[in-house]
Amino acid sequence: MNGAGPGGDGRGTVLVGIDGSDTSLRAAAYAIGLASRQQCALTAVYVSDCYAGPAAGALIAAGEQTAENLRGLVSDAIARTGIQGDFICRSGDVYTELVRAADEMHADAVIVGQSAKLSHRLAGSVGARLVRNARWLVVVVP
């Protein structure tokens, strides 16, 4: 990589998926460092799952609070490093929304944290799916 961004073809964009888990926060720190070193823009994407049913209101409220907390963390980090950055909140399937966001912004790199869930390790995590179907550099941070 050169100073022209991860792809080497101009000002790059690094996208990071963030959900508040320890691994996603490490992924965000890695992505912020990468964007800072490469003088790239950073976009952090939080995806809340859509739920229906009696508890939907409480889950939506909790997701909105998580999104606001993460928006604050990302904004602080962007301000400290001086990089260009953005925070996007979406609803739906995490993999689908990360792919959609990466395609929309022509991301050069997608950074995610490794899933800590056993079921994801057996059935396939978001990170593994991104790697298998990658159209960009994908980094899965442990």
Image (tube, grey):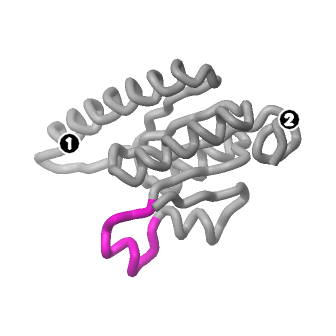
Task: Name the amino acid type tagged 1.
Answer: Leu
Q: Are marks 2 and 1 in contact (CB under 8 Å)?
A: no
Residue furthest left as drawn = 54
Q: Residue at x 46, y 61 (%)?
A: 142
Q: Residue at x 11, y 47 (%)?
A: 54
| 49, above or below 10, in the image | below
Task: Name the amino acid type tagged 2.
Answer: Gly
The residue carrying mark 1 is 59
| Disc 1, SS | helix
Which mark is in front, 2 or 1?
A: 2
Residue 17: percent from the left, percent from the top?
49, 46
Cα–Cα gap, marks 2 and 1: 40 Å
Q: Is residue 56 inside the magenta stretch?
A: no
Per the rendering, the mark at residue 79 is: none
> Viewed as shown, does residue 80 lie left or right of 9?
left
The residue carrying mark 2 is 10
Q: Residue at x 37, y 33 (%)?
A: 70
Callout 1: 10 Å neighbours few (<14), some, many (20+)?
A: some
Q: Which span of residues is magenta-colored?
A: 114-125
Q: Is residue 122 inside the magenta stretch?
A: yes
